[in-house]
Image: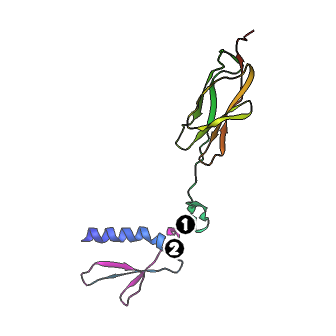
């Protein structure tokens, strides 16, 4: 019985500064009920005594003055994508009489559903965007060509662009 009374008194003594700081006019009263148990309340009774709080026990809440810490607005983490061309290497010469070339790219952090890759050949879109970064081109003319890959989001907006890669198509002439 005495342990529970002491425990109750300890809890209310520790909680008193919190109650006192939430409202400057809050008072705490104590009395014994019919069973002899101590009762603490913020409502006075005829037989209740006011608990005197020491001013140094009052702890001011930081959020009372600075509510910025309560900003719980979720932030959207924007993924920064990178797209690059692995094959061919810049300034490579491709020797193929049919004009065929294989282009392989990569995407970081990870290719996710809904994204598409548009290949540009000599500054113009080559075919339609596709859901991977591997391309097989046929019948490419002799000479110098530039390729570039664009990563598009679900709405078709460019979210990443590779460096431009120059390659030289070498096809044996029929002469």
Q: Quadrant of residue 115?
A: top right
Is 30 in front, or is 150? 150
Q: CA distance from mark 2 to mark 1?
A: 8 Å
- At mark 1, the secondary structure is loop
Mark 2 is surrounded, within 10 Å at the Cα level, by few (under 14), some (14 to 19) or many (20 or more) other residues, namely: some
Is 72 in front, or is 106? 106
Residue 59 among those drawn in magenta: yes
- At mark 2, the secondary structure is helix
Of marks 2 and 1, which one's residue comes earlier in the chain? Answer: 2
How would you classify the magenta stretch by its main secondary structure? loop
51 vs 132: above or below: below
Residue at image mark 1 = 61
Which residue is farthest front? 175
Residue at coordinates 28% horizontally, 69% vertically from top-left? 4
Q: Quadrant of residue 141?
A: top right
Residue 118 in sight = no
Horizontal side of 52 relative to 160 (left or right) equals left
The picture places residue 140, in percent across and down from the top left corner, at 69, 23
Residue 130 among those drawn in magenta: no
Residue at coordinates 48% horizontally, 70% vertically from top-left? 18
23 vs 138: above or below: below
Residue at coordinates 61% horizontally, 67% vertically from top-left? 65
Is 152 in front, or is 128? 128
Residue at image mark 2 = 22
Q: Which quadrant holds the N terminus?
A: bottom left
Which residue is farthest top? 175
Is 50 in front, or is 158? 158
Residue at coordinates 56% horizontally, 34% vertically from top-left? 132
> Label 1 near label 2: C-beta < 8 Å?
yes
100 vs 163: above or below: above
Residue range highlighted in magenta: 34-61
The total number of labels drawn is: 2
């Amino acid at each position: 019985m005495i342990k529970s009374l002491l425990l109750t008194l300890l809890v209310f003594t520790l909680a008193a500064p919190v109650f006192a700081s939430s409202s400057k006019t809050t008072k705490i009263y104590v009395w014994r009920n019919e069973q002899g148990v101590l009762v603490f309340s913020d409502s006075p009774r005829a037989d209740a005594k006011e608990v005197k709080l020491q001013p140094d026990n009052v702890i001011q809440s930081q959020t009372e003055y600075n509510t910025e810490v309560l900003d719980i607005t979720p932030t959207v983490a924007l993924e920064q994508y990178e797209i690059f061309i692995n094959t061919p290497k810049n300034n490579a010469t491709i020797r193929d009489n049919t004009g065929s070339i294989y282009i392989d790219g990569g995407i970081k952090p990870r290719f996710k559903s809904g994204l598409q890759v548009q290949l540009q050949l000599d500054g113009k879109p080559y075919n339609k965007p596709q859901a991977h970064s591997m391309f097989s081109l046929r019948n490419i003319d002799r000479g110098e060509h530039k390729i570039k890959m664009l990563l598009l989001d679900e709405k078709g907006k460019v979210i990443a662009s590779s460096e431009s890669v120059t390659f030289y198509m070498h096809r044996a002439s029929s002469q």
